[in-house]
Amino acid sequence: MTVDKLSIAQEICSYIFFADLHNKKLKFVYTQDDLTECQNFMNIKVYYEVTGDDRLWQLKAFYFLLHLKEQALVENGTISFGETL
């Protein structure tokens, strides 16, 4: 698939997601399988653009979850903001 075709596929998937999210009726019919395929396509695209290496993806996910945990601890008063990463 060329870069142009990937860009078009991304725009179509974004359009379908927006319509589905806002319950808009489109002039063409799409199914849940189409939404799943679009989600898979977007996940693969993000994966390759962000890291391209499975170990790096896991590292980013770990730090995201660590920050999320710290935010929850600050919100409930367990630790102060200064004690976070």
Image (cartoon, rainbow, N blue to C red):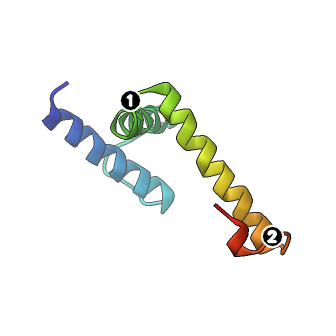
Is 27 above or below relative to 9? below
Look at label 1 and name its amino acid: Gly
Q: Earlier in the sequence, mark 2 or mark 1?
A: 1
Q: Position of residue 76 (x, y in %)?
A: 83, 72
Look at label 2 and name its amino acid: Ile
Q: Position of residue 26 (x, y in %)?
A: 35, 53
Residue 38 is tagged as none
Q: Quadrant of the C terminus?
A: bottom right
Q: Nearer the viewer, mark 2 or mark 1?
A: 2
Examine the image and state in which quarter residue 79 appears.
Answer: bottom right
Q: Quadrant of the N terminus?
A: top left
Query: Is disc 1 surrounded by few (<14), some (14 to 19) or many (20+) residues within 10 Å?
Result: few
Relative to the observer, which residue lies in front, 77 or 33? 77
Number of numbered discs present?
2
Examine the image and state in which quarter residue 84 appears.
Answer: bottom right
Q: Position of residue 66 (x, y in %)?
A: 68, 51
Q: Residue at x 41, y 32 (%)?
A: 44
Is 22 above or below relative to 76? above
Name the residue tied to disc 2.
Answer: 79
Q: Residue at x 76, y 74 (%)?
A: 80
Cα separation, mark 2 vs mark 1, equals 35 Å
Element assignment for label 2: loop
Residues at marks 2 and 1 touching, judged by CB atoms closer than 8 Å: no
Q: Position of residue 10 (x, y in %)?
A: 29, 43
Query: Is disc 2 surrounded by few (<14), some (14 to 19) or many (20+) residues within 10 Å?
Result: some
Name the residue tied to disc 1.
Answer: 52
Element assignment for label 1: loop
Is 11 above or below relative to 3? below
Direction from residue 38 to residue 59 in the image, left or right: right
Q: Residue at x 43, y 27 (%)?
A: 53
Is 30 above or below relative to 75? above
